Structures are given as structure tokens and as C-alpha cells.
Amino acid sequence: MQGATMALAAARSGLTPLVVERGKVGSGATGNSYGIIHGGLRYLQGLSIGRWRRSRQAQAWFLDNYPDHVRPLACAMPLYRHTMRSPMAFRAASALEACLYRGTGLARRLPGLQLLGAEEIARAYDLPRRHLVGAALWHDLVTDDMETLLRTILADAGASGASLLEETVAGDLIVADNRIAGLKVTRADGTVQEIATPRVAICAGSWSSRWPQEPQAASTAALAFNLVLDMPFPGDAALAVSETPGKGRSYFLRPYEGGTFAGTYYRPAPGAREPEVMPADIDAFLEVLDRALPGYGIAEAGVRAVMPGLLPDTDGTGRTLSAADTISAPGPAGLCHVLGSKLTTAPLLSIDAAQRLWPEEARRAA
Ligand SMILES: Cc1cc2nc3c(=O)[nH]c(=O)nc-3n(C[C@H](O)[C@H](O)[C@H](O)COP(=O)(O)OP(=O)(O)OC[C@H]3O[C@@H](n4cnc5c(N)ncnc54)[C@H](O)[C@@H]3O)c2cc1C
């Protein structure tokens, strides 16, 4: 997503970018993600107003530019008294959000928060009633076909002059007089080609550290993965659950092609080059889900697919991912790294990067 939207932003700035992708479009973290374009309600609970605003702006970007590739996804979260996931906390976040919409002039594009009763949510999902006091229901956006969305973004970039080379590995930078002069690439048949260019934008996600001028955030990785389970899931909303009711990391489960799409599980993977999910990782995630939703038989459910990705992360736990959005221009002139932490905000980060890195070109294109 970072590379595709960077190509779009560069092409719209009047440049003629070439996207070099070592695999197929979507073969990295983006194509294996849970596909949610987050609205940021949860950021309000931590009073991260800036992050809330950016998430809402990101949702608006997708709705304005790719309305046929995203759809609203209802998300339900069971609530418990005396926790951050209590009706009071969600009512406060919702009231704050209403004020922010008024104060910032941002338009509300998706339905606002609703609170459901304990009986209703317990019945819908067969949840244990102990300490359950209700549920929050909000809407995010989701994309069901990430590869098509990415190819559509790249086609739009192509209409403004961008092109794409798949199954081509970007290798060494060619530098002359401390300026970028080109990039060596290796094609699928093993031929090495030198591409002359005065600019290289590295948008290689967790692989960014392959180039020596790596941004700090890429130095440690987290492994993240989703599972498609051979088990039907009720309703059509996503359900957010946690191992201990009302506390800790949330995992989302939603119906998916007759099964259940469950995610996202994280573990530190320092120094990892490829996302390798071990049977023990899958077992650990199934056990967590089984504890979160007892009675579903998740521990014994068949696993239809594992969707893994590596994420650049400063502590390898997934906790600091939000801090990882970086645009840096280290080393030779013309080189930049654009490293995002979410597919949600990747397009906005690309627009920021283009404005910061190529203001002259953008002015001329305008
Ligand atoms: C399991 C999982 C679930 C997630 N769920 C969500 C979610 O619901 N919502 C959300 O907002 N975010 C989510 N994320 C995070 C999000 O997916 C990533 O932050 C985002 O997709 C990163 O995009 P990217 O383009 O920077 O990286 P990537 O998608 O990894 O793209 C990097 C690309 O660079 C290519 N590449 C690497 N090295 C080279 C080279 N030498 N030459 C050529 N090409 C190269 C790779 O093949 C890859 O395609 C999730 C991540 C994972 C792993």
C-alpha cells in the first residue's frame, strides 16, 4: 500500500515513477492484513486526538477515491464494568468524537457509535454473561479484495505516468557525487539491469532494512498473522474480543467465505527476514481465541489459511507500531524511506512524503 500510494502521489506530482516489486502486487504485509481501515475511535480513549483525526481523514481518502473497493464493517465489542471497555468509557469517547467533528469541520462519513444491551450481545454471540454489561457497536471500513484495490491504485498512478515491474528485486543503489544516479534491479530470469533515476523512494515495509540507511524503526520486526478458520461465525459484524474480558489486546473475528477470519496475533521476530509462522504460533493464537470465546471450539477448529506479515516495529511486540510512521531522507540526495505502520494511513503518509520531498515538482504539476 505504501509503494502503490507513493507511486500515485509521485505521478500526481508530475514525476514518472517506476514501482519495483519483488513478488506480485500485495505479496507483502498489505495483502495479508486484516483489511480494516480504522476509524480511530479507540484512540480517543487514550486522548490521541491527532491519531483519531488522521484515521478519519484516511477513511475519507478511501471513500472519496476508491468507494467501490471499501465497505463499512460493523464492529461489536463486549463491554465490562470498571474497565476501559465499559459503557461509560465508550460514551465519553463518543461525546468527545461528536465535539471533534463539530470543532474540526470533518464530515461524519460512517454511522456513529451505538451501545447495545448485555442480553442482546450475549444472545447474538453466545457470550458468557459474567460481568458483561453491554456492547459497543461502531463502523470501520474494510476492503475485501486487497489485490484489486492495489492494482486499481497502480492503474490510476499509471494513467498519470507511473509504471510497474513485478517479480523484480530492487538491489544496490547507484550513487555518484553523493547523489542517487540509479538503482540495480534483478529480473525474474536473473538478469541484472541498471535503471537510471535521480530519485529512489524505499517503501519496502519490514524489508526496508535491506538498504544500509535504514530508518531506526525498521531495525526490529514483529510477526503478525491472521487465520482463516474452518468454523462458521454468526452474524455479519466483526466481534472484538480479548483473552481477559475488557482488558488487553483485542482480536477480531468475522464471517469469511463460510468460515471465520480471525486476527491479528503478534509476536516479536527480531531480525526476521521473512514472515515465518510456526505451528506453535498457530496453537498459541488458537488458545488465546479459545479463552476469549469459550464454547466455540476454536482450539479444535481447522485452519484453512494463515496470512502472515512482518511489521517494522521498534520493540517487536506490536505495541510501538503506531510510532513507526516515518519519512526520512538519509544518505545521498534523492534517496528517501517511507515507512508506515498501518495500511489505513499509508495514502496520507505518501501524500505528506510527496509534498515534503518533491514540492517543486508538485507546484509545476499543479
Ligand atoms: C497480519 C496483519 C494484519 C494487519 N491488519 C491491518 C489492518 O486491519 N489495518 C491496517 O491499517 N493495518 C493492518 N496491518 C498493517 C499493514 O498491513 C501494514 O502496515 C501495511 O500494509 C504496510 O504496507 P507497506 O506497503 O509498507 O508494506 P508491505 O505491504 O509489506 O509492502 C512492502 C513490499 O515491498 C516489497 N519488497 C521488499 N523488498 C523488496 C525488494 N528488494 N525489491 C522489490 N520489492 C521489495 C515486498 O514484496 C512487499 O510487497 C496488518 C499487518 C499484518 C501483517
Image (cartoon, grey):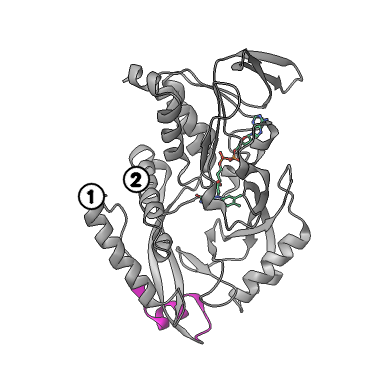
Magenta range: 114-129
Left or right, 259 with respect to 76, comes to right
Question: Going from the N terminus, do you reach mark 1 or mark 2 first?
Answer: 2
Comparing 191 with 211, the one in front is: 211
Disc 1 is placed on an element classified as loop
- Quarter of the image where ligand 1 sits: top right
> What residue is disc 2 on?
60
Location of residue 160 in the rendering, given as x and y in whole percent from the top left corner: 41, 20
Query: Label for residue 105?
Result: 1
Q: Is residue 222 above or below residue 87?
A: above
Q: Residues within 10 Å of mark 1 (few under 14, many from 20)?
A: few
Q: Is residue 47 above or below residue 288?
A: above
In reply to whether residue 121 is colored magenta, the answer given is yes
Instruction: Please state which amino acid type lies under the numbered disc 1.
Output: Gly
Q: Which mark is residue 302?
A: none
For the question of whether residue 253 can be seen, the reply is yes
Side (left or right) of 251 relative to 15: right
Q: Residue at x 41, y 66 (%)?
A: 45
User: What is the quadrant of the C terminus in the image?
Assistant: top left
Indicate the secondary structure of the residue bearing disc 2.
helix
Q: Residues within 10 Å of mark 2 (few under 14, many from 20)?
A: many
The one of 314 and 292 positioned closer to us in this rendering? 314
Alpha carbon separation for disc pair 1 and 2:
13 Å
Task: Tell me if 176 is positioned left or right of 277 in this view.
Answer: left
Q: In the rendering, at what x and y percent does residue 236 appear?
A: 45, 63
Residue 31 colored in magenta in the image: no
Which mark is in front, 1 or 2? 1
Asked if residue 34 shows in the view, the reply is no
